[in-house]
Amino acid sequence: MPPLINTVSLLLSTVLVYAQPSPEVQKRISAAIVAAANGSSPDYTTFVNPFIDNFGDVCPGASVPFGMVKFSTDLTGYAPAGYVTDPTQTIRGLSPLHDSGTGSSLGTYGNFEIMPMTCSGGFNTCATMLSDRETFRKNNTDDASPGYFSQTLDNDIKMEATSTRRAGLERFTFPEGSKPYFVLDLSNDLPDSFVGGIMDIDPQQGRITIGGKWGSSFGPGSFSYQAFSCYDLLNNGNQTLDEYGIWEANPYGLNAKGLGQTHLNLTQSLIGDHYEYGALFSFAGTPEQITIRVGVSFVSADQACANAESEIGTSSFDDIMAQSKALWNEKLSAIQIDLANTAPNVTELLYSSLYRASLTPNNATGETQGVFAGTSSFYFDSLYCSWDTFRTFYPLMALQHPVDYAQIVDNYIDGWRKLGWMPECRANNLPGWTQGGSSGDVIVGHFAINYHNEAAALGIDLDELYSAMLADGDLNPMEWDIQGREVNLYTQFGYVPFDAIDPSSTGRQTREGSRTLEYAFEDFSIRQVALLLNNTADEERYLNRSLWYRNVWDKTVVSDGFQGFMQKRYPNGTFNFTDPTDCSPQDTDANRECSLQGDNIEGFYESSSWEYSWFAPHDTNGLIDLMGGNSTFVNRLDHFFDAGYYLAGNEPSFQTPIGYHYANQPAKSIQRVRQVVFENFDITPAGLPGNDDQAAMASVLAFHLLGLYPIPGTSQFLILSPFTPNYTIHNTYLNTSTTVTTLGFDPKSIQATIPDGAAAYVKNVTINGVESPTKCHFDFYDVFRAGGEVIIEVTDDIAQGNDCGSAVPESVSMGGFGSLR
């Protein structure tokens, strides 16, 4: 077998207090990769490690692709996705609603937690309140694979789950001779946001229904959403309900149980007391295994029950798990690599990344509420957030799964239909906070540029799509913290000004520098669609606006000997100085606010000026001119990495390691990407450099491993050096397959520092038998739409590989992106 990839960061994980999942998980994955390398018809789900994480923001729970439900346990402590590996935290219960990769410190969803237990003294002795029922796990027993999740409590009760889109089966195995009891929670969720709800027990039917309202995990506290669940307890008549009733508790001694009572109808405590409520029930006899069917809805309890009946019916746990596995294999097999000659860790990293890239957003079509109730469009929850996902998540989807992409684009356009602007962030079916601007423009624009020929067949009206983009670009909402942009002042000054009055709209007056840069790139995406639709007036207008990133460039600022940085700016044109190192990894002020806080005075979002000064993906050559030419640009880029200002876990830095391409030094991009991958990603629960951010990290890693990088809003890919000798991308909608072969692939090059004599640098590129004049970029239309074969020939001669050939990648100020296919 090829050598394992560099495992520097694996060493770190051994000194942390975090537990690992069952050792059998990694053994199983490793054995599957070895077997597949020597066989045929691989099961791609066996290469996936759902526990690759950043200590709590990835959900390893049972889900189908883009499933509305993700069954996983909820634990105490920092647990945005419910589950964490930390053995010092306790299990609250198993629940069906989770996001993945959000990093929300409050946690997201976690409604309808169920907790199995044994109560030695009977019904009235069961621990019902959350703090009383919390239980440690049995170490090294956590298990998961696509469509399956399992965890064992330290009392040896095993919990398992599998799922469909809106329903699932929970299976509980009890120690021999135990009487099974369950607590089902009405009120608790991860962010502790219960507003009120209803629970009903139907003992004859063996069914418990729940409905209620909860608050947002990443949005205004005044908003609330509704959710419903349906728990069928009898397992098609194979289980008998025994005791049942309701309970109520608080931290001050209330711990009441109502045996035989069947109804709760409660509102939020206005005085602020924390009350907890739920159901408590047991099963007759001492059955070793209990299976419970669960349906979930955002419309009604009746619909939750109907979802369980239609999607699961009388199917067994194993049947549903097999169906889920088949759906995952369909998704994962869209990219097939040379398993025999690819390092096993690369295989595991790639397919785990592709798995997470189909976990979210959550397809809640038919489960709409509020202004979206009854919409005929597709509907997705957990757009969390567009600022995170436009760069690599949706371009990866465009390569493989345009049908899914079109459904999500329809969902964005429907946001404009219903609210006047496309969503920037949607959390728990509610508007979430805006981070950069209207990044949805780039998402729908990327679709239009790459699939305009198929748009109508995929259900997308390009004129309507463009109208939605124009609303973002031209219309200032009264409140732009949750949708749209601060367009009025932006168009008045040519940048987002600091310390300025907008008499007709409200929003948090921070991030002026980064918002200007993001607005300019969003304008570029609007320009591209205007060009596509032959709207010459808008094309010229938005082309000009796309260059406004230059308006926050302060050429007088010096840091570490380099001159010129992005800065926030007053209405009178003067700049407000921000130390370019503030909010960087080298910032020594641990109390500095750098995110959405009102006292973030730095002018940038989750980034330093050092980091955001590289952000003009559509015009990197324009940045080179601002910085003083190729030589200074390359030296400055080297210093950015060497001084520790680069932040792999932050989206504005995604394209930065490949910036050397634009200065005609692509070999340095390849060296830097190798370093980025091996210093920041691995196959452990600490294997991500930050929050997965709805698979933003997963998708950028997938592109690095494939030797590509997309320019969002365009059809252009930058060419790097693949980590595998051969792969094929299948696009079943276009009915095309494209095979990328790395001629001269050298396994020795797959490490953080490419050793002398190892072939890694691109010597030439051939597309369907025709040598490309440039080695640095190619077009989606020439490669992945057309299908066929791409040969990337690599060499160990750095000088030979450190030249793009006829042209560096395109930049708009150099006349690039001026014609579309």
Image (cartoon, rainbow, N blue to C red):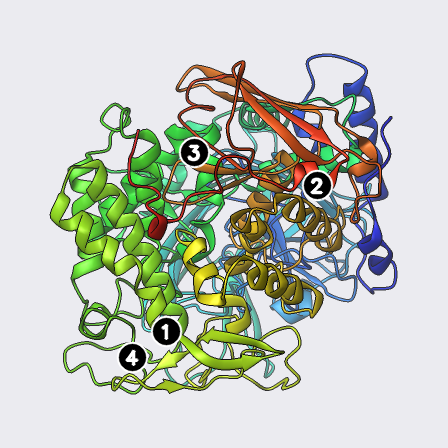
Tell me the SS state at disc 3.
helix
**Amino acid at circle 4:** Pro
Distance (Cα) linking label 4 and label 1 = 9 Å
Left or right: 544 as drawn, with respect to 140:
left
**Amino acid at circle 1:** Val
* Tag 1 near tag 3, CB within 8 Å: no
Residue 734 position within the rendered picture, expressed as x and y whole percent measured from the top left: 39, 18
Tell me the SS state at disc 1.
helix
Q: Who is closer to the viewer here, 217 or 662? A: 662
Q: Nearer the viewer, mark 4 or mark 1?
A: 1
Q: Which residue is mark 1?
A: 552
Q: Who is closer to the viewer here, 161 or 301? A: 161
Q: Nearer the viewer, mark 3 or mark 4?
A: 4
Q: Earlier in the sequence, mark 3 or mark 4?
A: 3
Q: Is residue 408 visible?
A: yes
Q: Is residue 204 above or below residue 12?
A: above
Q: Earlier in the sequence, mark 2 or mark 4?
A: 4
Q: Which residue is mark 2?
A: 799
Distance (Cα) linking label 3 and label 4 = 35 Å
Quarter of the image for the C terminus: give it.
top left
Residue 512 position within the rendered picture, expressed as x and y whole percent measured from the top left: 36, 76
Q: Nearer the viewer, mark 2 or mark 4?
A: 2
Tell me the SS state at disc 4.
loop
Residue 362 position within the rendered picture, expressed as x and y whole percent measured from the top left: 44, 44
**Amino acid at circle 3:** Ala
Q: Which residue is mark 3?
A: 398
Q: Nearer the viewer, mark 1 or mark 3?
A: 1
Distance (Cα) linking label 2 and label 4 = 45 Å
Quarter of the image for residue 125 reads bottom right
* Tag 1 near tag 2, CB within 8 Å: no
Q: Please rate how many residues cluster around mark 3, counting C-alpha atoms within 10 Å: few if below 14, some from 14 to 19, many from 20.
A: many
